[in-house]
Amino acid sequence: MLRSDGRFLTTHAGSLPRTDRLVALHAQRAKGESVVGDQFAEAIEESTQRVVDLQRECGIDVGNDGEQARESFFTYVQHRMTGFGDSWIRPIMADIQRFPSWAVLRASDLAKRQVSLMQLPVCIDEVTSTGTAEVQAECEVFKRALGAFPFAESFMTAASPGIVALGMEDRHYNDRAAYVTAIADALRPEYEYIASEGFVLQIDAPDLAMERHVTYAGRPVEEFRAFVDVVVDNINRVLIDVPRERVRLHVCWGNYDGPHVFDVPLSDILPNLYRANVGALVLSMSNPRHAHEYRCLRETPLPEHVLVVGGCVDTTTNYVEHPEVVADRIERVVDAVQDPTRVLAGTDCGFDTSAGFRTIAEDICWEKLRALRSGADLASRRLFG
């Protein structure tokens, strides 16, 4: 995994705006409606080329395919595994229950969501991988989009077994640890395939923070930390053949602009996250609830082999960060880590975590990435000379 040698590298958390045509096709597929294969493949190819070109234009060093082939960052697995059917309504976040007027205020935005992250599939039978055909197709589309002008480094995302287990209710295993284990086994071929293609694997694991105020709301934090350990142990187990320096772990508290008053402090879970056999952590460090937590990296230092992608851009507000603000955020993280080469500049989360649902206007998404690049250049001049 590349370090910031001589200049701060820029990256992001994975999902990027999809074209309207692709959003409509994902929405059809998510509802179980048939889509014309050629049209779907063509829309994915077109949208992937678009986001790759835009990332280059914005100055992103470590880029990806924007998750264009997926309906959301984790429900896509229902098309790559056996065992899912029916549906359920996922519990709402504890902070939204505490402040229901937020949902009223955001009702028009929520109504626009075409792929729901609340009404989700259910595990009704044994979960197994159906193979790597879809991820193979994703990688091939991404390679074609990169062409002769690759990023300095490229990554591909994949879901954490924990977010699948808690987002897609278990009605088969009747044991949470066993369910997480089965999902991890089904994800293993995808993890390994991404790494074998030369991409950095990013595991998207909001479950390791967000589920404290969803599934584990009102319960002892020790119970939640025990769940985090179960997920991390399974990730480590199925990554046994993937070099840790080719894996980064994205952890967040949910990509929505709610109050977040019940978010678990980073300090409560950081020791558990350090148990993950990965080469980098991707952490939210710019939103108003977690902007102070760069200090945790000073109080509980990163393991020597681990880099950090510090969130320097908030993905829930249409304010575009001033480059000076981005530079300040980078410099604070460096001050905590005490090694600028181990710090990359990134975003708090994705910009389009489920197809068609975003709180930020599309053109502002790209402007935020331009600000990220400008701020990284400022910080580079100050800290690298």
Image (tube, rainbow, N blue to C red):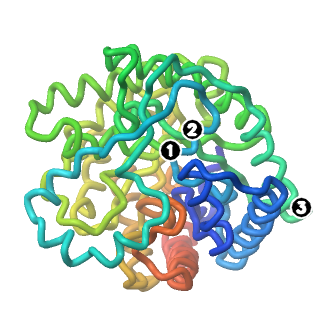
Q: Position of residue 276 (x, y in %)?
A: 44, 28
Location of residue 142 (image quadrant)? bottom right
Q: What is the secondary structure assignment of the residue under circle 2?
A: helix
Q: Determine the residue positioned at 48% across, 54% down.
A: 309
Q: Amino acid at mark 1?
A: Phe
Q: What is the secondary structure assignment of the residue under circle 3?
A: loop
Label 1: few (<14), some or many (≥20) within 10 Å?
Answer: many
Q: Determine the residue positioned at 49% across, 25% down.
A: 235
Instruction: Assign the N terminus to one quadrant of the image.
Output: top right
Choose between 213 and 289: the one closer to the eye.
213
Q: Which residue is mark 3?
A: 147
Location of residue 47 (image quadrant)? bottom right
Label 3: few (<14), some or many (≥20) within 10 Å?
Answer: few
Q: Earlier in the sequence, mark 3 or mark 2?
A: 2
Q: Amino acid at mark 3?
A: Gly
Decide: is 71 above or below 204. below
Please identify, in this view, whether the residue under mark 3 or under mark 2 is nearer the observer. Answer: 2
Q: Amino acid at mark 2?
A: Val
Taking 108 as reference, is 84 left or right? Answer: right
Label 2: few (<14), some or many (≥20) within 10 Å?
Answer: many
Decide: is 326 above or below 85. below
Q: In the orientation shown, which residue stands out farthest toward the right?
A: 148
Q: Which residue is mark 1?
A: 74
Q: Position of residue 262 (x, y in %)?
A: 14, 52
Q: Determine the residue positioned at 36% across, 23% down.
A: 171
Q: Position of residue 75 (x, y in %)?
A: 51, 44
Does the image show residue 334? yes
For residue 77, the mark is: 2
Q: Determine the residue positioned at 27% across, 41% down.
A: 211
